[in-house]
Image: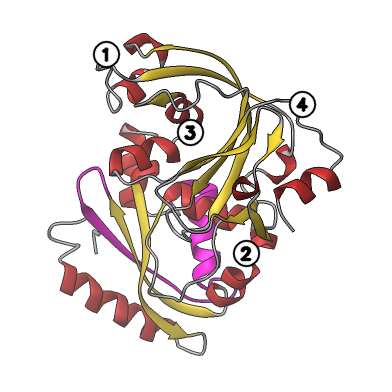
Amino acid sequence: MNIGNILKAFDISLNYKNIKIVRHKLRKDNELELIRNGFFEQYQSIQSNPVFNKCDAIISFLVDEHSKKTIFKGIFKVINEKEYEKGDVRKECSDVWKPDGKRRFYTLEKTRDLEELCDRLVIEWGGGERAWDQWYIYKGEKKENGDKEIVEILPKGFFMRFPGFLDFSFLWYELENIIKNEEAHQDWYHALSRVYGVYLITDEEDGKHYIGCAYGENKGIWGRWKDYIETKHGGDKELIEILKTDPDRYKSFRFSILEILPNSSTKDEVIHQEKIAKEKLGSRSFGLNLN
């Protein structure tokens, strides 16, 4: 199945003579941060070269930073084009993509075509990854190299598959997406709800650590982290105090697992491993743990 097939299946006719299919791949940390904060469309509107000048519309994809899959982001009409100026985008974006007299700014309008498959439709881009913009239709004629193969349609709310207990480190919004979309992440739920463990929260604003543990009935790691998503602080006194002075600070918390323990472990066994981790990382003396 390819893009043409899926458009036909959804009874969508793209009535544009010139359409490009584009594959955005972010390489800089500051660009990644802006995309995480919801600025994809502004990022896409700023181009170093006049790549969209002859386009009536573009079909956009973004390479996911975790899975490396090429995922559909929407179909956009190209309204107009001009020299990029500072006031064209929000300050967060202009601080990263500065006007230089060469960059172009495109006014793009997202259509409702295939909107139910945004962030879900995965394609195989094929060879020649440097050719990130390719014609899908040019002057009314469909181009074979632009009709990409569809390899997967992800569940609604899907973020990524479970990679293993020690092979991830998530910012708040990433963990929130997994916890709040339990049906789409059953592999995460089944893995994390059946184990106890010692986890690490790093405040990326200042680098300080908080070490906690999960144990008890319905308190596998999944249940414990769900507490954080629902309350922002998980009931931890140290984090509560931080949020009193900076209510949005939770957005800078990064979660990871230090050690996994079977759910047959006693409370004392889990707390003992938590204590060792605190000593190793100095989270009492230099971090956020009080005891």
Residue 41 at x, y percent in the picture: 51, 29
Instruction: Name which residue lies at 17% across and 73% down.
Output: 279
Residue that label 1 marks: 101
Query: In x, y percent, where is residue 190?
Result: 61, 75
- Position in image of residue 133 (x %, y %): 49, 39
Residue contact between numbered discs 1 and 4, judged by CB atoms under 8 Å: no
Callout 1 secondary element: loop
User: Which numbered disc flags the more N-terminal residue, 4 or 3?
Assistant: 4
- Give the Cα separation between the discs numbered 4 and 2: 37 Å
Residue drawn at point x = 28 percent, y = 17 percent: 99
In this view of the protein, which residue sits in the foreground, 244 or 30?
30
Q: Which residue is mark 2?
A: 185
> Which label lies toward us, 1 or 2?
1
Front disc: 1 or 4: 4
Residue 75 found in image quarter: top right
- Can the viewer see residue 170? yes
The residue tagged with tag 4: helix, strand or loop?
Answer: loop
Residue nearest the viewer, comparing 32 with 266: 32
Task: Specify the amino acid type for callout 4.
Answer: Asn
The span shown in magenta is 204-233
